[in-house]
C-alpha cells in the first residue's frame, strides 16, 4: 500500500485501555482506512504494543512523548506541568502539519485545551465546540453541539455552532440538507428561557443552514433533526442524563434477567438482540466527539474506548479531512462575519 | 369505612385516557388509601364511568365542570376562554378548602397555571417548581426540581427549590437526611457556568438542608443524591433527554428481538424481566410530578396515565397532606426570609 497523504496523530497514552487498545485500533485504522498514523507516547510502551501486530505495508510512525496527563488530573495543571505530555505532542503534530487531524481518548478537558492552545482556532470562530453524534431509533443521527466545551455561551455563538454542525453532517455523513434545530423545552416558537428566545431569532434569520425551529430533548434520539445546537452546559446535561438513564436501565434489566431460570434462559436466547441493541446505542460505534472550530480535525473518543472506538475515530477524522470540513467551516464563518459587518 | 378527613380533587377529564382510566384509578385510590375523592368533570361522563365500579362505602363525590382544556390547547388561551374547565374547577376545590390536594393528568401547563392562579403560592415562595422523582438503579430515587415550571430562574430560586425538595423527600419518602445536590456538568466545585457558580455558593451556606455539592446528569439515576436542584430549562432538558433515549432504546431492542426466531423465543421467555424492567423505570410507578410551593398539594400525572398512575398520584397526595408538607415548606421558607432580612 502506498503511503497515504492523510496522516492522523493518535495519543497512544490516553484512555482507560491505553496503550494496548489504542495501538490496536490505530493499526486497524491504518489498514482499513489507508491513512498514515503517528502514534504519540512513551516509545518503549508503544513499540511493545506495536510488535504484537502485523504492521507490514502500513504507514505507522512512533512520535516520542515522555509524559501522560491522567484521567483524574486537572487539565490546566497537567498542561502547565507536563510540557512533554502525549496529548500536547499529539496536538503539536497537527500544528506543525505533520498530521492533518488528531484522535485522543484521554481526558476530554486536556484534549480540548491542547487543541485550543497548540492547534488554535479557525479565524473568526469565537468558540470551538464539541459535537456528539447521538444514537437514534432511526437511520438519522443527530449531532448535538455544543456538548460541553463552553459552559457559558452567548446566543450568537449558537449560530456558529449551527454552521459547524451543518458543514460536518453534510460533508462527513452525507446529509443532503441538514435540519438544524435549537434544543429547547417546547416545540413552538416562544418556548424556553430568554437565552433560547434570542438564539431562536438569530438562527431563524441565518441563511447558512436550514433552521427547523425548536427540538426537545426527547427528539434528540428519534431522527427529528440532523443538528441540535445548544450551549455547552445544557448540551452536557442532556448527554450525561441520557447516558445515566441508559446505564440505569441496563443495570435494572440485567438484574431482572437474572431473577429466574426462565428469564435466564430467555436472556441466553435473546443475547444477540440484547448485544445488538447495546451496540446500536454504543458511543464507540459513532466515532467519538468532534472538537469543531479548531485548525485541524480533532476527534475525542470516550475515555473507555477500545480498539473499535479508536478505529472509528480514525475513520471520522479521515472523512472530515478528505471533505475539507475545515476549509468549508472557515468559508462560512467568514461569510457570516461579512454579512454581520455589512448589516 | 368512615369518611376520611383527607379529600383530594381529581380532574376526571384530563389525560389521554380520560375519563375512564381516571375514574378507575380514583375509585382504586379511594379504596386503597382511604381518602375522599372529588371527581371533577362532565357529570354524565363521570357518572357513567363510576357506575362500572363498586363504590359502596367509598367517599366519592362528583363535582360538575362543563368544559375541558385539551392536551394540545394553549394553557393561557384555554384558561381564559374556558372558565368552567375541569382543571380550573379542580383547583378551586383546593382553594375553597373542599379538598387539600389535587391530582391532574391533563396538560401540565394548564394544571400549573390553574394551581398558580386559583390556589396560589405559599407566602414567601418566589416560584413554585415541578419536582419529578426519577427512576433509579438503586433503592434511592432522586427528586429533580425544577423539572420545567420556570424556564428562567435566578440562583436564589434554587435555594427555595432545595428547601421544598428536601421537605418533600424527608416527609413523604422518609429519607432521613436528604442529600441535596446541584445539577452541574462536573463534580468539582468551580465547574459549570456562571449561574451554577453562584447557585453553588448560595446552596453551600444554606443551613436548611444538607448540600452535597454538584451532581452530574448521569448521577440522577444511580442513587447519588436524593434531591437535585436546577433551573426549569436545564431540568426539563435533562428529563426529556432521558425519556427520549429510553424510548429510543426500547424501540431498538424491540426490533432486534424480532429479528430472528431464536431472539423471538428468547424475548418470550425473558418477557417477565423485560416487563419488570420497563415497570421499574415507568413514570406511572412514581406517582407523577409535584408542583411544590402551592398552597395545596398538587400532583401532575403523565398525560398517558392509566388507572395505576392515578392511584399512585392519589397516594402521593395523601402522604404529603398527612405529613403537612405545606406547613413545613412554609416554615422553612419564612426562616430563609428572616435569615436573609437579618444578614
Image (cartoon, coloured by chain):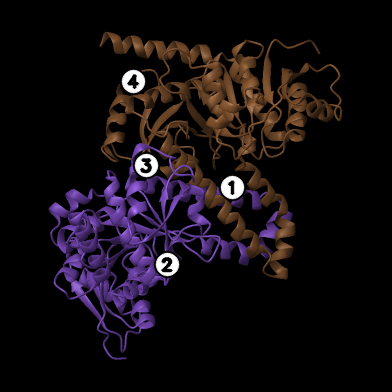
Chain colours: A purple, B brown
Q: Can you tell which quarter of the image residue B21 is in?
A: top right
Mark 2 surroundings within 10 Å by alpha-carbon count, few (fewer than 14), some (14 through 19), many (20 or more): few
The residue furthest bottom is A1
Residue linked to disc 3: A197
Chain for mark 4? B
Chain for mark 3? A
Residue linked to disc 2: A177
Visible in this render: residue A147?
no
- At x 66%, y 63%, the residue is B257
How far across and how far down the image is residue B30, in percent?
75, 22
Share a chain, discs 4 and 3?
Answer: no
In the rendered picture of this protein, how many numbered marks are placed on residues? 4
Give how far apart the Cα atoms at labels 1 and 3 are: 39 Å
Q: Can you tell which quarter of the image residue B138 is in?
A: top right
Give how far apart the Cα atoms at labels 3 and 2 are: 24 Å
Identify the element where label 2 is drawn. loop
Chain for mark 1? A
Q: Is residue A77 above or below residue A332?
A: above
| Left or right, B325 with reference to A238 | right
Residue linked to disc 4: B206
Mark 4 surroundings within 10 Å by alpha-carbon count, few (fewer than 14), some (14 through 19), many (20 or more): some
Share a chain, discs 3 and 2?
Answer: yes
Give how far apart the Cα atoms at labels 2 and 4 are: 50 Å
User: Which quarter of the figure is the N terminus of chain A placed in?
Assistant: bottom left
How far across and how far down the image is residue B42, in percent?
75, 26
Amino acid at each position: 500500500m502506498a503511503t497515504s497523504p492523510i496522516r492522523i496523530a493518535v495519543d497512544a497514552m490516553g484512555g482507560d485501555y491505553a496503550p494496548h487498545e489504542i495501538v490496536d485500533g490505530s493499526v486497524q485504522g491504518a489498514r482499513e482506512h489507508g491513512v498514515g498514523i503517528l502514534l504519540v507516547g512513551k516509545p518503549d510502551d508503544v513499540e511493545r504494543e506495536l510488535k504484537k501486530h502485523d504492521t507490514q505495508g502500513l504507514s505507522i510512525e512512533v512520535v516520542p512523548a515522555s509524559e501522560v496527563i491522567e484521567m483524574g488530573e486537572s487539565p490546566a495543571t497537567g498542561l502547565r506541568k507536563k510540557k512533554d505530555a502525549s496529548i500536547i505532542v499529539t496536538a503539536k503534530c497537527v500544528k506543525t502539519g505533520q498530521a492533518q487531524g488528531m484522535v485522543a481518548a484521554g481526558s476530554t478537558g486536556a484534549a480540548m485545551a491542547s487543541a485550543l492552545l497548540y492547534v488554535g482556532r479557525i479565524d473568526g470562530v469565537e468558540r470551538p465546540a464539541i459535537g456528539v453524534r447521538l444514537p437514534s431509533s432511526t437511520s438519522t443521527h443527530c449531532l448535538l453541539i455544543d456538548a460541553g466545551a463552553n459552559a457559558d455561551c452567548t446566543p450568537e455563538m449558537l449560530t456558529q455552532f449551527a454552521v459547524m454542525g451543518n458543514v460536518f453532517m453534510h460533508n462527513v455523513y452525507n446529509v443532503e440538507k441538514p435540519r438544524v434545530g435549537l434544543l429547547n423545552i417546547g416545540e413552538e416558537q416562544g418556548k424556553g428561557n430568554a437565552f433560547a428566545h434570542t438564539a431562536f431569532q438569530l438562527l431563524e434569520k441565518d441563511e447558512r443552514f436550514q433552521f427547523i425551529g425548536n427540538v426537545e430533548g426527547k427528539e434528540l434520539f428519534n431522527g427529528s433533526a440532523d443538528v441540535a445546537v445548544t450551549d455547552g452546559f445544557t448540551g452536557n446535561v442532556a448527554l450525561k442524563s441520557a447516558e445515566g438513564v441508559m446505564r440505569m436501565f441496563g443495570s435494572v434489566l440485567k438484574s431482572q434477567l437474572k431473577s429466574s431460570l426462565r428469564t435466564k434462559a430467555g436472556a441466553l436466547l435473546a443475547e444477540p438482540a440484547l448485544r445488538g441493541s447495546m451496540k446500536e446505542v454504543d458511543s464507540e460505534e459513532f466515532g467519538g466527539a468532534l472538537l469543531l472550530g479548531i485548525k485541524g480535525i480533532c476527534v475525542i473518543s470516550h475515555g473507555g474506548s477500545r480498539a473499535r472506538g479508536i478505529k472509528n475515530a480514525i475513520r471520522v477524522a479521515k472523512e472530515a479531512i478528505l471533505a475539507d470540513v475545515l476549509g468549508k467551516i472557515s468559508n462560512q464563518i467568514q461569510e457570516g462575519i461579512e454579512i454581520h459587518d455589512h448589516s
